[in-house]
């Protein structure tokens, strides 16, 4: 057992990289936190600027546009600067985006005073969102493949899922902090979210500057993935070679659809909880209010409110808190998934979770009351391992070209810019429950990719490859 644990972070040449792995994993927490705040921002702009669901999805569009625009430049720089240089560049870009929220808030205040239009204020915040996402692109392009080589290749999928568990922790904290500052109110009960929205982003800017200093002095060996397909024997400038491998090509498609489904569900979680949940019983409100008086549980206050029809429902702030609970389900899925991936083939787990999420979306679509609400949380659990597992399966065996392949897999995150607008349009016409028909189709394709991966890759699992099959 001890030897098995050691091989998790020890390379074939005997390097113990557990400290390097821990440091790189901190980056996952950072972008999980930033993404978690993005996912509770939509409702804020819907109410402050009177936007429809589809219009508020421009937040997701700006966020994922940053990934699309910077993925290839990030991959190019990663190949020239190495892992450390690329990470430092990414951190500096995130800091710049975080600090931009200060002038964006000034523009928002000018809009409130009637000096500039509200669309101008919205656009200013979108610039900051896009800038942060551009920096996160560098971090994801580099950190995801790097985790797969920090030890024995047999545990590549396990390592990337463990690192992505830190992403889950950030996603839990993001909605709590976002809800605190985006939906804050003064003593008169008036919203002050536009005045305090910048605070957590400035905090992010300060933290990433400190991280950049730490990474500058850290030991980060430049290790490449196994060259199972002998791509490195060919012309190193032949950028088309990775596209001759169907397991990589379809991983880009699967990643596009996964992030599309994830972004749609995450970004409209608050809308679902405030519009589709059955009326809250008075006894439940009393119990939650009693718990809120206990030290450490004050954040539960204000979970419910009366709507215009006099029905007790979940408030925006309460839904933001529930988003953190959903991300706890996501985190549990990451940890349990990492354990399963040590015993079962990664492609089988991906196929199973994809199929189960199809079932979950059907149950949400069916509007079965509290059971459908429970299924929304369950969807977070089954989404948990998808991104890192698709990533590991996609770059399997690509050798030095894994960095270039990683850039395209990160570019596929652009799917998150597309689906929220489509899902929002369906919800505007019908309701949020019916909108789950859109991610349902995405999960069906992802499940199929998982089950078909051995045939696509010519490998029984990620432990080895038979280059005579599937290519």
Image (cartoon, rainbow, N blue to C red):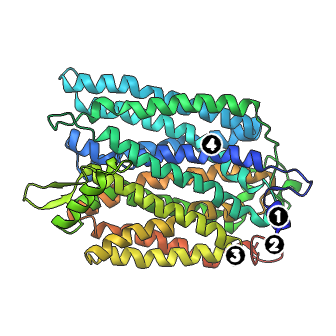
Earlier along the polypeptide chain: callout 4 or callout 2? 4
Q: Find numbered disc 3 in the image and state the secondary structure of the residue it sits on.
A: loop
At x 62%, y 64%, the residue is 390
Please determine whether, in this image, residue 2 is positioned above or below residue 43.
below
- Residue 465 has which mark? 2
At x 61%, y 29%, the residue is 210
Relative side of 437 to 392, left or right? left
Q: Nearer the viewer, residue 246 or 164?
A: 164
Earlier along the polypeptide chain: callout 3 or callout 2? 3
The x, y position of residue 300, in whole percent, is 31, 52
Image quadrant containing the C terminus: bottom right
Provide the residue designation for mark 3: 345
Provide the residue designation for mark 1: 229
The alpha-carbon separation of the residues under discs 1 and 4 comes to: 26 Å
The answer to whether residue 365 is visible is no
Q: Find numbered disc 1 in the image and state the secondary structure of the residue it sits on.
A: loop
In which quarter of the view is residue 208 placed? top right
Earlier along the polypeptide chain: callout 1 or callout 4? 4
The x, y position of residue 50, in whole percent, is 19, 43
Provide the residue designation for mark 4: 139
Earlier along the polypeptide chain: callout 1 or callout 3? 1
Q: Nearer the viewer, residue 462 or 286?
A: 286
Q: Are marks 1 and 4 in contact (CB under 8 Å)?
A: no
Q: Are marks 2 and 1 in contact (CB under 8 Å)?
A: yes
Which residue reaches farthest right?
13
In which quarter of the view is residue 228 placed? bottom right
In which quarter of the view is residue 421 placed? bottom left
Relative side of 12 to 99, left or right? right
Earlier along the polypeptide chain: callout 4 or callout 3? 4
């Amino acid at each position: 057992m001890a030897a098995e644990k050691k091989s998790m972070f020890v390379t074939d040449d005997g390097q113990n990289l557990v400290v390097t792995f821990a440091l790189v994993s901190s980056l996952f927490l950072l972008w999980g936190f930033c993404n978690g705040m993005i996912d509770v921002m939509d409702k804020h702009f819907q109410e402050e600027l009177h936007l429809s669901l589809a219009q508020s999805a421009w937040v997701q569009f700006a966020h994922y546009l940053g990934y699309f625009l910077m993925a290839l430049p990030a991959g190019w720089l990663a190949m020239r600067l190495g892992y450390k240089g690329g990470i430092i560049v990414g951190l500096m870009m995130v800091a710049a985006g975080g600090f931009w929220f200060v002038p964006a808030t000034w523009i928002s205040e000018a809009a409130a005073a009637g000096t500039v239009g509200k669309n101008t204020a919205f656009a200013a915040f979108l610039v900051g969102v896009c800038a942060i996402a551009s920096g996160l692109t560098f971090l994801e392009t580099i950190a995801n493949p790097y985790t797969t080589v920090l030890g024995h290749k047999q545990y590549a999928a396990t390592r990337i899922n463990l690192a992505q568990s830190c992403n889950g922790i950030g996603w839990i904290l993001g909605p709590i902090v976002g809800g605190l500052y985006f939906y804050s109110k003064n003593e008169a009960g008036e919203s002050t979210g536009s005045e305090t929205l910048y605070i957590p982003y400035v905090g992010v800017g300060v933290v990433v500057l400190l991280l950049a200093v730490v990474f500058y002095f850290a030991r980060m060996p430049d290790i490449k993935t196994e060259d199972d397909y002998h791509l490195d024997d060919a012309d190193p400038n032949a950028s088309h070679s990775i596209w001759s491998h169907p397991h990589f090509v379809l991983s880009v498609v699967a990643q596009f659809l996964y992030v599309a489904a994830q972004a749609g569900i995450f970004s409209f979680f608050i809308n679902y909880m405030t519009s589709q949940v059955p009326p809250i019983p008075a006894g439940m409100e009393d119990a939650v209010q009693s718990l809120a008086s206990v030290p450490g549980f004050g954040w539960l206050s204000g979970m419910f409110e009366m709507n215009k029809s006099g029905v007790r429902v979940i408030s925006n702030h309460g839904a933001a808190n529930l988003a953190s609970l959903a991300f706890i389900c996501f985190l549990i899925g990451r940890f349990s998934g990492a354990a399963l991936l040590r015993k079962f083939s990664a492609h089988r787990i991906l196929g199973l979770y994809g199929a189960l999420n199809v079932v979950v979306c059907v149950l949400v679509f069916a509007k079965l009351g509290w059971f459908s609400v429970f299924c929304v949380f369950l969807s977070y659990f089954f989404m948990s391992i998808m991104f890192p597992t698709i990533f590991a399966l996609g770059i399997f065996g690509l050798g030095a070209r894994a960095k270039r392949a990683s850039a395209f897999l990160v570019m596929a995150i652009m799917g998150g810019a597309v689906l929220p607008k489509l899902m929002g349009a369906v919800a505007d016409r019908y309701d949020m429950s019916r909108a789950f028909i859109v991610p349902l189709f995405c999960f069906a394709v992802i499940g199929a990719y998982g089950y078909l991966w051995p045939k696509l890759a010519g490998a029984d699992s990620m432990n080895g490859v038979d280059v005579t099959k599937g290519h």
